[in-house]
Amino acid sequence: MKKIVTEEAMLREYGNPKSVFVNLFNREPKQEHGIYYFGNEDDGDFFDESDVQIWRNGSLKNHWHSRALLENKISYHLVNEIIKNSSCVVDLACGPGMGLIPSIKQIDAAFPCMASDANTLVLEEWKRYLGADEEVKKLDFAAFSVFDIPFQNNSIQAYSSYIGLSNTRHGNDGYKKALSEIYRTLVEGGMFYAIESEWNDIPAILDLFDKIGMQPWQIFEEKQISWHDRFIECGFEIVYERPQEYRSLRKEDNELGEAAFRYGVNIGLSFNAYIVKKRGI
């Protein structure tokens, strides 16, 4: 049964119900274009005007209306659990796909969400695309890095991510820093709902790089650690863990995909769904 949260309860817990997240910031942001800015843009992906043209030519529209995650029983369960067990959620490193927010809004348009990303351009384009759409009346935008989340300690009920953390910079150190910030800012017992990716068959991947005479990408130069182990090491309790999807690397994707096709090797990314809980100290 869905958790019922009244306006009065929201007011008692957060103050103004239109400012659910704003009242939880740990410092004053700059505010323009309906977006809260906290800096650290270099921690995010780099986009330019060519990306903007792709977004404006239908990419954002397709992401906003996509039902792909809702048609997969594992990701549907994840999204439904957010709505059922939380009164709001902050989506981290949402990117051009807006993370899990489009799926959440298709189930419950009034569910309070915050879309966050270190890159300001992608948030500004989302804000421009969505405009005054009534469907997004409870959607905030904040530009910040997952390495420096601008919320008070023990203040956030729930975070979500759809391969947002998987694309975090600085390898294992970056993953650990992001998870420590999530842990710091979650309330005791707070939840992180995530679909994150991992490469399969690392020895085969390294062998392919050797065969084509290429230096392995930086991600493969470090020890590969599963998201399961990362969550445990950072103090989380795993409540739910399921494989959500597997995507083979295709010939047209990049040089590694072309090499895999040439040598008949199946390599790719496994996507796993997690619900993890902040354990009490």
Image (cartoon, helix red, strand yellow):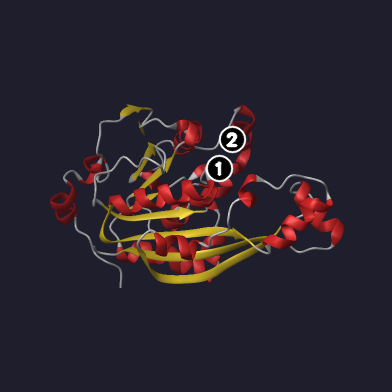
Q: Which residue is drawn at 36% across and 32% down?
A: 38
Q: Considering the numbered disc 1 on the image, is that residue within a helix, a strand or a loop?
A: helix
Task: Sort mark 2 into few (<14), some (14-19) or many (20+) by Cα contacts within 10 Å.
Answer: some
Q: Please, what is the three-letter code of the amino acid marked with disc 2?
A: Arg
Please state which of residues 193 and 258 is positioned toward the viewer in this rendering: 258
Q: Residue at x 53, y 62 (%)?
A: 226
Residue 68 point in image, percent of width and height: 57, 60
For mark 2, what is the residue? 56
Q: Where is residue 167 in the image (x, y as percent from the top left)?
A: 54, 47
Front residue of 244/187: it is 187
Kindly check if marks 2 and 1 are in contact, taking CB atoms under 8 A apart as contact. Answer: yes
Q: For residue 190, what is the image quadrant?
A: bottom left
Q: Which residue is drawn at 29% across and 50% down?
A: 185
In this rendered view, identify the residue nearer to me: 57 or 260: 260
Q: Mark 1 points at which residue?
A: 60
Which percent across, then down, holds residue 267?
A: 72, 61
User: Which disc is residue 128 wearing?
Assistant: none
Q: Residue at x 78, y 47 (%)?
A: 255
Is residue 267 among the parts visible in the rendering? no
